[in-house]
Structures are given as C-alpha cells and as structure tokens.
Image (tube, rainbow, N blue to C red):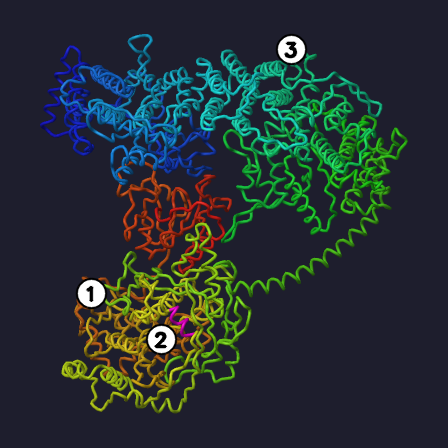
Amino acid sequence: MADGESSVNGLQLCTRWWEASDRGAAMLHYILEQVPHIYCLEAEPQPVEEEQQVREHILHPLECFLFGEDPSVGLQKLEHKSFGSSSQQCGRVFKEGETVYSCRDCAIDPTCVLCMDCFQNSVHKGHRYKMHASSGGGFCDCGDLEAWKTGPCCSQHDLGTSVAMETDDCVLEAELQERAQTLFQVLLCYITDLMVWEEGDELSEEMKHGMNENTYYCVLYNDEHHSYDQVIYALQRAISCDHNEAHTHTALIDKEGRRAVKRGTLRTCQQVKDLIRSNSEHITQQALRVEILHSAVMAHQTFALRLGAWLQQIIGYSVGFRQVFCQVALEPGADDDKPCLISRLMLHDARLYKGARKIIHELIFCSLLMETEYKKQFAMKFTEHYKQLQEDFISDDHERNVSVTALSVQIFTVPTLARQLIEEGSVIKVIIDTVMEMLREHLDNNQRFHFQGYNSDKFFRVQVIFHDLRYILISKPTAWTEQLRGKFLEGFSAFLGLLNCMQGMEEVKRQFGQHIEVEPEWEAGFSIQIQLRHILSMFQDWCSSDERVLLLAFQECHRALLRCTNQPFHSEPTDSYMCKHILHTRPYKVSQEPVSIHLPITRLLAGLYVLLCRADAVKYLPDFVDPDHLDFSAFAEHPLRCVVLAAEVSAEMWRRNGLSLVSQVYYYQDVKCRDEMFDKDIIMLQIAASKMDPNHFLMLVLLRFELFEVFNGNCSSKDQELLKQWNRLTEEMLYLLIIIVGERYVPGISNVTKQDVTMREVIHLLCIEPMAHSSLVKGLPENESHETGLESVIAKVATFKKPGVSGHGLYELKKECLKEFNPFFYHYTKSQHSKAEDAQKKRRAQDGSDKALKPPVPPPFAPDFSCIVRLLCCDVFIHVLRRVLQRAVEERCTLWSEAMIQRALHLVGQALIEEKTQLEASNVDEVTFDFSHKARTVGSDHGKSLFHFLSQMKTLPSLDAQKDMINWLLQMFEIVKCLREKSSPSAVCSVDQTKPEESFQDRKRKAEAAKLHRQKIMAQMSAMQKNFIETHKMLYDNVPESGSQGEPAAFMDCSAVEFEERHVAVGPQQGVCPADWEALTCILCQEEQEVQAQAPAMVLTACVQRSTVLTQYRGKTLSTEEGSYPLFMPPDLAVGTHTGSCGHVMHATCWQKYFEAVQNTTRNRLHAELIIDLENGEYMCPLCKSLCNTVVPLIPLEPSKLNYESAELVGEVLTLPRWIQIVLARIKGLRPAQRANSNADMGKEETGFLQDDQTDFRSIHSFGVQPPPKYSSSITEMLVVCATTVHRVGLQTAPNELCPHVPVMTWNTCAYTIQAIENMLQEEGKALFGSLQNRQLSGLKAVVQFSAVQRLKSSQTVIQKHFTDMLAVLVPVPDTEGTPSVLEVDFFHLLVGLVLSIPALYQEENVDLQPSAISSAYNHLHLVQLLTMAHIVQVLLSSHDTSGVIGGGDEEEAKAAEALYSTVSQHTEGLRSGVSGSMIADRVRRGVLPFLRCAALFFNCLTGVPPPEALSSTAESTDSQMTLLCSYLALPCNLFQLFQEHRDTVTPLVQRWCGNEAILKALKGEMNIVRYPRKRNRLIDLPEDYSVLLNQASHFKCPKSSDDERKHPTLCLFCGTMLCSQSPCCHVQLDGEEVGACTAHAASCGAGVGMFLRVRECEIVLMASRTRGSTYPAPYLDDYGETDPQLGRGNPLHLCPERYRKLQQLWQQHCILEEIARSLEVLNVMFAFEWQML
C-alpha cells in the first residue's frame, strides 16, 4: 500500500468515482489520462520508477475504490470474515522446466500433477510417484477432488477443500460485490480492448486526450521462423546498433514476445519497419512481424499487462472476488453477436505476443479454472470456439505451451466436465470434425488420405488435437444415460468417418524390374496411427462398459466397413481344389496387386467382436446385424493380405520398393503400433478361422501366400531365387499357423486376464536375456496412462539382481517360468527370436536337459473360438506338414530349410499337445480331434504317412539340431496312442526310452567334462586379466587392487633379502637400497632395455594438472606476483601441481615419433580440440588411452654405499649445531665478497648463537664429496621437457626453461603428488605402503627421481639462492628478505625443496661436486629433524581447541610436551594456558602424522630403502604407526625429545619462530590459520532422496536475474554452491572471454576442473579447461538400479553411496581430465558443444 498522502488522494478519487453518474466511465477516463504520463515517456523503459508511479497514481486509488476505504483496513476485515477465506486449491502455475509430480497409485490420470511444495507435504510422497519437467502452462491439482482417488490435498491445502470446491453463490457484502463488479467490468473491458488492438485501429478521442507529442514506436515481434542470428543481423542493419545491443533486443523479444526497437516519428518508424522486413525476408523468404504503434497505445498496452498481474493478486484475496470476476468475464456482450470478454481474448490469442498470452492464461488459471461452476461455463465456451482456436493455433508459429489451446488438458481431463461436454457440447464430434477439417486438404479422389508433400510443422500441430480426444476419453463412465449413449455414438460415428479416410490409404504395389525412384511418404500415416493407438483402445473400453453401446458400436463399425469401397477384387471367383476340398473364392495376389497396411475399421471391428464374446453378448448380435452380412472370411481378407505383405517383405520380394515399405512393416509389428495393427489382424484371422471350414481357411491362406500350387504339386522351378522365396514364404505361412492356433493370450479369445497377458510378455522378454527395468518397460505396450502393468507381475516371474558400481540392476527369469517359453512367440522380432532360442538352448545344455524347445501348453480357447483347433487336424494341414517333412527326408535341399522344419515340428507338437489335453479332459469317445490318427494314415496319393517321415528324420545327419525335438514328438505320439488305448505309456515307451536315458547320462558326463575344461581356461584368463588390469588406471576401479602385503612392489627385485635389512631411510643408519628398475619393454617398439644413466632415455607417460583436491580455502587462487609463491607453498595448499602417470614406458625417441604422428593426424580430425589440446602438448597414451601432456624420464637410482663405521665417526662431529654452522658458512661464502663484507655486522648479530669463526667456507666438503652422475643427452633433454611442462601448467605461464621457478615447480609437483597420494590412502583406509597399484608406484618413484636430478639442468646459483631462502624459514640466514613465518608455509613442500636443493651447496666454481653418501645421510637427517621440530611448533601455534585423547602417550612424553608448550607460550601471546601435557602430546601426534607419512613416502622413493613391513598393514593404530614412521625417518619415538636433545640450539630458534609478527596477527584472529591435521576434502554430502535436491532447485533464485524464466540450477559437488548455468544472465568475463557460470566457478573452485550436478537433468557434468567437458551418470538410482538422465522415466531416485564414492575417487585421483578425454574419444562429436558457456 502507498503512503499517507497518496491514501488521502486515493480515497478522494474513490469517493468521486463512486458518486459519479457513470462510475465506470469516470474510472476509465482517469486511467486513460494517467497512463501516458507514466509509461513510454522515454525510449528505454524505467521499470522501477514506472512501478512506483503506477502503484501511487492508479493501483492504490483502484484498491481504495474496491474496498471503499483504506485498502489495508478493508483487506484486514475481509480476512477476518469466514466468507473471505481463499480457495483451498493450490493452482500454482508451472514454469517451463519446473519439476512436477504425479502419483501412479492415486492420480485419476497422468495429467494430474502436484507442484514440489504440495508433493513434499502430501501422502503421495510415500507412494509410487513419477517426476518430470513441466513444459509450462499447467497448474497444480492439489485440492481438486476429481483429480485424485485418495489424498486430494496436501497438509497446506487440507482445510475446507470441499467447501471451496462447491461454493457456487457469491458471498461478498452487497456494496463490496457491487464495487468489485463495477471495477472488474471496467478493467477487464479495458484489458480486452487493448489486447485485441490491431495495428491499423484508430486512437479514440479519450486516448488522444493529453497527448501533445506525436511519437510512435516500431515494435518487433517474436516468431519461430527466424533464428537469433537472423534477427540480430536484421536489427544491426535497420537501427544501426552494435552486436551487443541487437543481442539484448533479440533476447528480450524471445522472452517477452515483442520489443520496441525504435522510438520516433511515424516516418522514421516506417523506415525502420521496411528495413527490418526486407533484411529478414531475403534470408528466410518470410518477413519478421513488425508493427508501428502510437506511444499512447504502447503505454496502455503496457499498463494492461500490469493490470492483469494486479487482478490476479486481487482475485487471490477472496473466493467472492474470484466469483465476481468470473461472472464479468463470462457475461454475454451487449450485442448478441458480440461474444463475452473471455471469448474475445481467447479468439484473439494467436495474435497476442508471448508476454500478453502468459498474463491472460494465468488470469484464466486463477479465476475461471478454480471455480467448479464457472469452469463448466468456461469449458462450454472453449468447446464452442474449439474449431476456431485450433485453426488459429495451426496457423500460429508459437509453441503450444503459450497457446490457449493448451488449456484443454485442464478442462477435458475432469471426469464430470468431460461427461457434460459430451452430452451438451458434442465434444467428441467437435474434436473429430476439427481434425477432419484440418486434414481435408490431404484427401485424394477416393476420399482417402494421401500425405505426399505435407507440411511437417502444420501436421505436427494437427496431431496435437488427438491429445484432446484422448483427454476426453480418459475416464470411462460408470453409469450411462440415454443422452450420453446418443452423443457418444454420434462421436463414434464421426470417428469412424476419420478411420474411413485411413482405411486402405497409401496403397503400395510391388515394384518389378527397376528400383523405385522416389521413396513414398509413409511417416505421416504412421504418426496418425500412433496417435490413434490409445484412442482406439479407449473407444473400445468405453463400448465394453455398456452392453447396448457395444452392440450399437459394432453395428456402426460393421456398416462403416461395408461402406468401404477400398481394395476391391478385380477378378471373378474361381474354384481351387486340394485334398478333395473345393474353395470358391476370388483370386488375388499380394505380389502383383495394390495392398495397404492401414485397415483401422477392420481391426476395430475385430476388437469389438472379441469384447462381445468376452461380455457374452454375441448371442444378441443377430438383432443388430444381419447374419448374412457377417461374412468373416471377407472381413479377414485384408488382414490376411497385410500379414502376407509382411511375409513377402521378409522374403525380400519387395526390395525394389525401397526402405519406406520395410519401415512400415517394422512399425506394423513394433510395440508402438502392434496392439492396434498386427495383433488385431491376427485376431480377425482367428475369428475367421473359428467361423470357416478349417480346410477352406487353410486353402485361403495358401492361396494368399501364393503357395497353393507349390503344395498341390503342380509347380516346380529351377530358379534358385524363386525356390528361396517359396521356402521363406512357407516358413512365414507355417509361422502364421503357429500364431493363429497358439496365441490365445487375449481376454475374450481365452479365459485370461490382462495381468496374465503382461506376465507372458515379460517371461518372453526375459527369455532373451536378463533385462533392466527400463528395457522391459520399452518392450511392453503402454496403456493410455503410460502404464505397462509390469510392477504387478515382475515379482512373480523374475528375481532382481542389484547393480555394482557401474551398470544397472537386472531381472532374471525364475526357473519355474521357463516352461512357458514359446520359441515362436508372435511378438518376437527375428533377432529376438534367434537370441531367445540360443539362450534357452544354452541354458538347457548347462542344466543337462535335452535341447527340445517344446510348445508350451496353452490355455483353452473360449467357446466362441474353440473351433480354431480344428485347423490342427484337418486334411489340408496334414497334407502341408507331410509335404514339408517329405522334402527333408528326400534330401531335396533346395525345397526345404531348417527353419521350415523347425516350424513344422512345432505345429506337430501343438497338435499333439491339443490332442493329449482333450483326451485327458474327456472320454476318448467324445474327442473328435484325431491328429495322431491322421498323421499315421497313408496319404490320399498313397504316399507315406506324416509319422513315417517323422521317424525317418530321426536318423538324418542334416537335422541333428532337431533330434531332441523329433524324439520328444515320437514320445508324444506314443503317449497319445496310449491315452486312446487307455494303457500305460511307460510300458509301451520303455524300449524307446532306454536310449534317451543313456544319451542323457552321456550328455551329462560330457557337460561336466566341458565345464571343467571351461573352468581351467577361465582361471588362466583371469590370471592374465589381473596382470593386465594392474597396468590400467580408472578403467577397472571395481577390480580389487593389486599389491597386497605379500606382493612385491613394481619393478622391485626380491633379492633385497640377501642384504642386511635396515628399515631406516634417513641418517647414518640408512638401509641398503635393493636393485633398481628392472629391464623394461617399450610399449611402442616392444624392445627391452635397462634404465641406465648413459643409455637412451626411457620415459613414462604423464599428465600434469593444477589441483585443488587438498585446498583448505576453496576458491583461493595463488599468483607468483604476490607473496612468496611458488618458492613457499602456503599451508592451505590452495592450488597445487599434480603429476600422475598411467605407468606405461616408452623410449624417448619412440615417444617423440608417436607424438609428432598424433599431432599431424589429430589436426585433421573433426573437433579434435574438444578431446586433446595439441597446442599444450597433449596426447593419448598409445596403450590405455589415458590423457597425457608430458613424459617423465626414468632415472636410475644412485647406489647407496654407506660405510656405517665412518658414518658413526662423522656423527660424533657433525651434530645439529655444527651442521647449521657449516651450512651457514657455506651460504655466506657462496655470496659475492663485497655483499658479505657490507652486511657482516648484521649477519653476526642475527646468527650469533650459531656463529663459529673457525668454520670455513669449504668445511662442508670435509665430510665427503663425489662427482655428480653423468646422464645421456636424451635423458637431459627429457628432463627439460618434463620440467618445462610442469612449470608451464603449474604457473599457467608461457614455456621458459630458463625461468628461476622451473626447479621450484618440479619440487612442488613432487611434494604435492605425494601429499595427494597420502591423502587418498588415508581417505580409503589403506596402508601407506603396499597399497598402491604398480602404475601409481612406478609413476611416483619416477617423479621423485626426476625432481631430484632436475637441478643438474638448472643454474646452480639459482638453486643455491632457493636453498638459502627456504632455509631462512628455519634458521636465521643473513641478507634474506620477505621470509614467511612458520604459520605461512607448508613444511612438507619445504622438506622436499631443501632435501633436493642442498646438493647445490657443494658445487665449486670449476668442479662439479655433490655430497657423498655420508654427507647426504646427515644432510637429510638434520633437515628432517629441523623441519619436524618447526612443524611441531606450527601445530602448537595453530591449535585452537583442547580436544584430544587423554592417555595416548607415556608420562615422559607428556612432561616433554608440557615443557615445550610452556616455552612456546613464553614467546607468544594468545596461546591457551592450562592445557595438560597428554592433550598437547596427542594433538601433536595427530597433527604431525600426515607430514611423517608423506616424508616416509618421499624418502622411500628417493633412497629406495624398504619400509618396515608393519607399515604395509592397515591394522596399525596411530601410535604404532607413529613409532614405525619415526624409526624409518631416524626420529625418536617421542618427538619432543628432539627439543630436549638440542635444547641449546633449538630454544633460540623457537624464540625466533614465535617472534614473527605474523604469529601475533594469527593468534589475534587477523589472519587465517590452517589447523592440523588438515581436513580431508570430500565431495559435498548429497541427500538420499533426489526429490530433496529438486526441491532445492525449485527454490533457487538466480542472483543476477529477477525473472522467473526456466533456469538450469547446477550444483558444484566440490563446494555445494548452486549456480545458474546455460543462462546469459550469469555470463562473466574470464581473461577477456565470455564464459558461463560453471566455467567461471570451476576456474576458482577447482583450478579449471569442475564436477557439477545438473539438478533438473539429473546428470553429472565433468569439466576441464574451458573448452572440454563431458556428461557422466549421476550417482542416483531408481528402485530398479538404473540412472535416469533428463528424468526421462521419472521414477523416484535414491543416492547410491558406492557410485558417489567412485566419483570421489575420480576427483581425488585426478582422473577427471582422463575421464573426459576417454568419453569424448568414444563419442563421435559431430557438433561441438560450447562447454565454456555452461
């Protein structure tokens, strides 16, 4: 509400309007006067100022008028009265992409949906629900009693629902009602007039009033014909703007539907209009829609939209307001010809722009569709205008979700409304007449559809109308009235009129000689068929719910079929003779005459007839249809032609007709169409078979298959192609007979339920192979509610196997269901048939049973269809089978095929099972089925009997595969014979059964031998496979990792046991290094070579990448321009450089050749830059295809020749203080003489306690030196290659091998890689040693050795300077500036740097020297001791709590810890006092442990000394692990002893460490402190239920956008930030390039690497650099163990911890780049995706 002054003005205005003679006119005059002073005053709109003024000057006075007082007071009164309660329907209007939920258990139909909030608060959350993304335009059905079987309301909308739904009378006070009516009448008229405004309309005098300026706007409208670029192009040339401005205009036009692109005089606007139209027209032959509107019109139209939103708000205050608004909207016009206001808006909808449509539709949603009574009135209006609305929609180019026609789903799906619209509005007829009107242009001269050259966009829009017909039929009536019957049958007749135009459409004729030139159009016809599939089924369901309707519908359908003049016969009837039977019929050949696959009326008649049989209403049929006209043999003619067509296509007789016919036949039998096409044809043939003489029926089938003369023996040929066709047609004909006789799983044809039908479908799908739930759903037909019935039967027939870390859950068929398997199941495709057959034979062989695939015992036919079984014992049937078997016995190979014999044997089996079943169910005398008798009888031509041929086939070697089946058939003959003779079959069959029994035992023995042989081979393969897997990286994560306790590490020789084992890697007691790298084989040239210093270089493939896996402050970046990075790595490890390897070895020369070849070939590949970055030296490993960007040279380990006696003597002299003195003296001596002299005093003052005048510059050499190793030129070259890559990638800088940071970055990557591996091992709970795979261990060893010798290729002066600067952190070194405090460095990086750079101190001017083994041992020892002590102090200074495990150490340790803490406290302010020694000791142990673990890994790789075996065990506790690590690193187990042993030396150092200013800042909280042990980074915690994530996404608001358009909320899995991806609103500039939110976030959060979850798409996006990324399955699975990308299936999803753990490993092991490269390598990328815009 506005402020006080405005309130007074508003109330005064309100009084003036109320007292006016014409209140509406007074209000309208005021609005027309005010609006031009608020809107469209400038070229660019000012939304904030405009909103403020419109609230103050117009909306507030209108609110005052509505309430007659201050609006806040009036609203409060309204809320306090019971009649003011708002509706309990939710009514939330969905945005495009918003997640909605439907309950499969409770929703009346799938269109009944809930918004996120209502779903979360409803009972349906615990039911079987589905979720999907809304296409926009619908609203939440919570509170609608007709939408739900149970739980219609959520907890928020539960109160008073029934009252809200049933309130019909207006419940406002009389004056308030009058005010509301007046106000709504004026405002809705005003909105309507402006919305339907056309460009040429004249301004009214009132609108011109007060408008002095003659200003116009050139307005550009959105359309779907022109692309963004085309509109930008047209705008740039028309209004002379730059690309960005044109892009902004275009984006807003696309979003709102229109935008003013020019403000000026009428003439200038006209010029711009002409330019835009001409520039757009020459691109697409269609001009953009541009209008010139007066500024007054623009202003009023803008305000009209604002009024629409304001009215929604007002209506929401009260049910009464809503009802008044509905009355006004539906009130007829003053003139009878003028429609009501809402009708005017609906009829003009297609001319409205997107923004206006949206407001009008939302106004309809929140008013007319929320009130039951007015919803009915609106529905009648909608139906009345339905045809016009659909015509407008079809000529419109906007999507349906912004069309008023989309409201049909809100109206037609309400059961009561649907009934009313059928009865009062004839809505079925209206919809079908509309479709017919739209498709009339496609009718040919015979009044049949012909879609050649149709407009696909228009045709797609026409198809949408069929959805409305489905909505109307979605709820079957429970009670019928005469009016409903009449109107339904009227609609049904109209529907038959539509089907009549499809009956026989698009006939095809077999092409001879020449291939067809132009493929005929076929997709349109099948598109309609797919749309009609459920409608046909629903019409039949409606008919079946009332017996009279069913009979009348059958009568109508029969008449329609008789009226069809399509596909007539062109010849007179003739007689055909076979087996003494005569068939009088008209000749017709599918191969020569036209045939159509579209027979909807025939198929509908078949469906209705089965329903009549099921309802036992066939007996009443003569009262409705003349029996003489019920010629089912004639009705079956066209379905039989279709089946024959499919058979001939299968026999490749129609090859010259092209792919269009093959596609038609495919869809004819496909799951999408078969239930209303192929299945109905089979039913019609079964009906005919039940009514006709079986011999005549079979003769008709033979005639149509063009096999009559072949089986009559009057036809012979030597044409191999023709013989092959006959064989294929015979196979298909026999297959058809198997189907007609055996396929009884149709309710009505036999006594089965829909559940039985589904169960049988599932059994046969699972007989092919174990299947995932989604695969089963795809293989099953859906009903109109998109349900397959799978869940109700799957548990009965299959067991579920849960998925592993990859793949999906599978259903396996239960063994007891195998007996139901029918190898000739009629819904199998050819490939499915062969797969199922192979699978079942294999299974039987494994079980040791015979391979006979026997026909299953079918359910008995219903009485009306029981005559079909006579086919199996008629003369023609016996004759056909005898002829087929005779061909095989007589070895005439061109006249038979194995498939033919297989089908013939199956038919024999069906006949024997039928006879056996009948004999067991009845007395022998009553059974007339006599197949076995006829089969044993000699043929009419005095030939041998069928049984004789069958017996002979048993010995044919060519039919070995069918031997088991033949044996079973012969046994069945004996069983049937015994049943007829009423004797025991066992006695008769005993002789015959001995042989099968023996063969069974023999088979069993052979099967067991084969099984043992297979197991032996599999064991060998498994061993080889394990060996192979060890060398691969992330490909085989689910395979247990190699290298357990007992196994030796990679490339290590077990001969180490010969030496005296000393498990110490540091100091004078250093153990012996076993043999180094063994002889290695190059993966490219396969030559073997040993790693030697002077030999050609061997290299390991490697990938260097920046990493934030260990960061303690995510989002922080490091730069060389600020601080002491990269020499000093901050303790937060913000960004590190990781070097990983897949462990594959090559010669350096081989690698160089391979790399050059890759560069040359990849440059020519499409979108190669998406896979590998050639400019940055990337390539794929030749063996495992891992992504690499450098190679690490393999360096031979220097043999350690430590003389322990000498080392001990040296140790007595070279104590820690003495070592420090010597090192400092060396540093001082290495500096230029003049600098040393000038700073002598200062140096002495700083380091006085460590100075010794007798320490000479060269004292460092007195403990042993040696010449450095000499390496071959190729090794030194590879050193440079690797170091340059590490430097370039790590610092994101140009390659420069002379940069002083090069050696530092090699040390840093060595340290960071070790820390990452230690972190990974700790995270996975693995032992420090022995857990790494061979490839990881060899890669790590290579990196450490490379880092150790890289200094040889750098300037020794630079190395010395780095050493000096690093040492200054620990001891006072003169002339060093900017040294960080102990809290600002990572001590492990410092340890690696100092250890690897100290050899440079030994360098002389003219002589290359390095420390001897003893010198190195003591250097390492003292550096480890110093750094450990400094790190302990660092841990103490950074501790902020006193938590710890008390009693973890002994008393002595506690005292020493307390003493140290006391010393540190003396030199610092802010440390907590009163902390016990045991707590301090425990805190230090936990804090120092990661450092010691990393140091142990480092020295193990550097020196090669094996660690204590106990460190290879995960069972070690922290304390025992500490003891072992300290022992290995030559440290005391009680680390505090270091401070006591070197008290005099360390105390001043501690004082210096603690006295740094940064320490004081940190303890005061002015600086971030890293706590130890550092926290281990994991991916964020995800909720177990995916709907929680969707809920978060639904409440996500883009921080940079105020609109509510669809967003793509994307969750960063590293830090949990929700981002707005793929949206221009969040694009940012990164290094001068525009990138999306995810790319920008990955740059700071993951150093360019990102792992995001796109919430609404339910998929992971992996990103690496700006141009590369790939999708990855989300770690959420449904109850069936499957992921659901794009939420396509919509099942409830739950987090799979194993898969999420795998994602975490992918990140922690730095394999994201590799995964992206691999996935892109597999995909053939045709169109590059702009990952940088994500």
Q: Amino acid at mark 2?
A: Lys
Instruction: Tell me the residue that label 3 is attached to.
Output: 623
Disc marking residue 651: none
Q: CA distance from mark 1 to mark 2?
A: 39 Å
Give left or right: position of 1000 versus 199: right
> Magenta: predominant secondary structure element?
helix
Q: Residues within 10 Å of mark 1 (few under 14, many from 20)?
A: some
Q: Position of residue 734 (x, y in %)?
A: 73, 33
Task: Estimate the spatial distance between the alpha carbons at disc 2 and disc 3, rounded to whole Å.
Answer: 106 Å
Q: Which residue is mark 2?
A: 1353
Q: Check disc 1 and report the residue beneath it.
A: 1562
Residue 852: where, in percent of width, then height?
A: 74, 44
Q: Please state the extent of the stretch shown in magenta in the rendering.
A: 1275-1282
Name the residue rendered at 43%, 59% in the picture: 1711
Q: Secondary structure at mark 2?
A: helix
Furthest residue to the top?
A: 336
x and y percent of residue 1070 in the render?
40, 83
Residue 1231 included in the magenta stretch of the image: no
Q: Is residue 10 visible?
A: yes
